[in-house]
């Protein structure tokens, strides 16, 4: 009996024994994105970026952008959780199609001019604890564009189209009802869809830990860096996908 108890204790303390939930998405171009969840933290990464990922403390809530190429860490919490919800209309349309083998409920988002922006499909309160925490995290979102470019003041609202602002404002209310798992635009293009929920294998616990030696980069500086790369070109890709590694 004593040997059994010792074995169980060692098993629960072994890093490889940690249970990770992985939510897999595809975008409109077939590129895969992953959200890896464990212990109240989530890491979002995409095939589109070999350098950067998003790290979220689901219970605080807080959100960070990590750039493993430049070794910078951006606390974007105020961008995502200090605004108001102002510019959206939300309508329940009824039962939607199955997504990754699970039933969905469809909602329609409209902007302040009552124009159709998109159709969003939800899993209503998924049974997995990790996914419930992710849903609650999204329910707290209140995007504040002024925190991206503080110098612009109220003009920062104009950085987003009316539909983009409506959809960002609707995230919190949608997530009170379920976890968003598919989005279809007003012109019938599917921009993201969950393809699988699975248990993660070979995942290191440090992948979901905040980097301790990275340089702090304020959100406005990160926005300017992204804009410059979009205008003048990016950097060369690394020989291996950095987003699969620990910071």
Image (tube, rainbow, N blue to C red):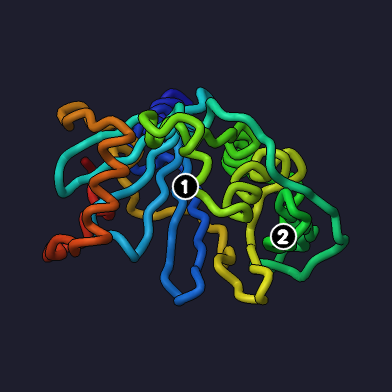
- Residue shown at 58%/63% (left/top)? 194
Q: Residues within 10 Å of mark 2 (few under 14, many from 20)?
A: many
The picture places residue 157, in percent across and down from the top left corner, at 52, 40
Q: Which residue is mark 1?
A: 159
The residue depicted at 28 percent of the width and 30 percent of the height is 218
Q: Nearer the viewer, residue 5 or 150?
A: 150
Indicate the quadrant where residue 215 lies: top left
- Looking at this rendering, what residue extends furthest in the right direction? 94
SS category of the residue bearing label 1: helix
Q: Position of residue 32 (x, y in %)?
A: 43, 67
Mark number displayed over residue 126:
none
Q: Which residue is mark 2?
A: 121
Q: Does 37 sit above or below residue 29?
A: above
In the rendering, at what x and y percent does residue 145 appear?
48, 37
The answer to whether the residues at label 2 and label 1 have Cβ atoms under 8 Å apart is: no
Q: Say left or right for 69 vs 173.
A: left
For the residues labelled 2 and 1, the Cα–Cα distance comes to 26 Å
- Residue at x-position 68% and y-position 45%: 170
Left or right: 99 in relation to 222: right
Q: Secondary structure at mark 2?
A: strand
Residue 50 location in percent, x, y? 25, 59
Q: Quadrant of residue 222?
A: top left
Name the one closer to the observer, 161 or 73: 161
- Label located before the other in sequence (2 or 1): 2
Q: How busy is the neighbourhood of tag 1: few (under 14 within 10 Å), some, or many (20 plus)?
A: some
Q: Is the residue 192 above or below the residue 40 in the image?
A: below
Answer whether residue 144 is visible to the viewer in this image: yes
For the question of whether residue 132 can be seen, the reply is: no
Q: Residue at x 64, y 68 (%)?
A: 185
């Amino acid at each position: 009996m004593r040997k059994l108890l010792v074995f169980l204790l060692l098993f629960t303390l072994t890093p490889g024994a940690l249970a990770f939930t992985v939510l897999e998405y595809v975008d409109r171009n077939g590129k895969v994105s992953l959200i890896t969840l464990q212990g109240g933290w989530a890491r979002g990464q995409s095939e589109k970026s070999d350098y950067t990922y998003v790290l979220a403390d689901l219970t605080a809530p807080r959100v960070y952008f990590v750039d493993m190429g430049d070794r910078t860490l951006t606390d974007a919490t105020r961008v995502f959780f200090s605004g108001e919800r102002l510019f959206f209309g939300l309508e329940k349309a009824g039962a939607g199609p199955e997504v990754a083998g699970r039933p969905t409920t469809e909602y329609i988002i409209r902007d302040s001019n009552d124009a159709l922006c998109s159709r969003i499909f939800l899993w209503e309160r998924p049974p997995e604890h990790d996914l419930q925490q992710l849903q609650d995290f999204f329910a707290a979102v209140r995007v504040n564009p002024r925190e991206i470019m503080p110098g612009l003041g109220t003009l920062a609202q104009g950085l987003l189209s009316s539909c983009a602002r409506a959809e960002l404002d609707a995230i919190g209310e949608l997530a009170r009802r379920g976890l968003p798992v598919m989005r279809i635009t007003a012109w019938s293009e599917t921009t993201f869809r969950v393809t699988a929920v699975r248990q993660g294998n070979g995942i290191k616990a440090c992948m979901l830990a905040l980097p301790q030696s990275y340089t702090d980069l304020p959100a406005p500086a990160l926005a300017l860096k992204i804009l410059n790369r979009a205008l003048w070109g990016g950097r060369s890709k690394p020989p291996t996908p950095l987003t699969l590694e620990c910071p």
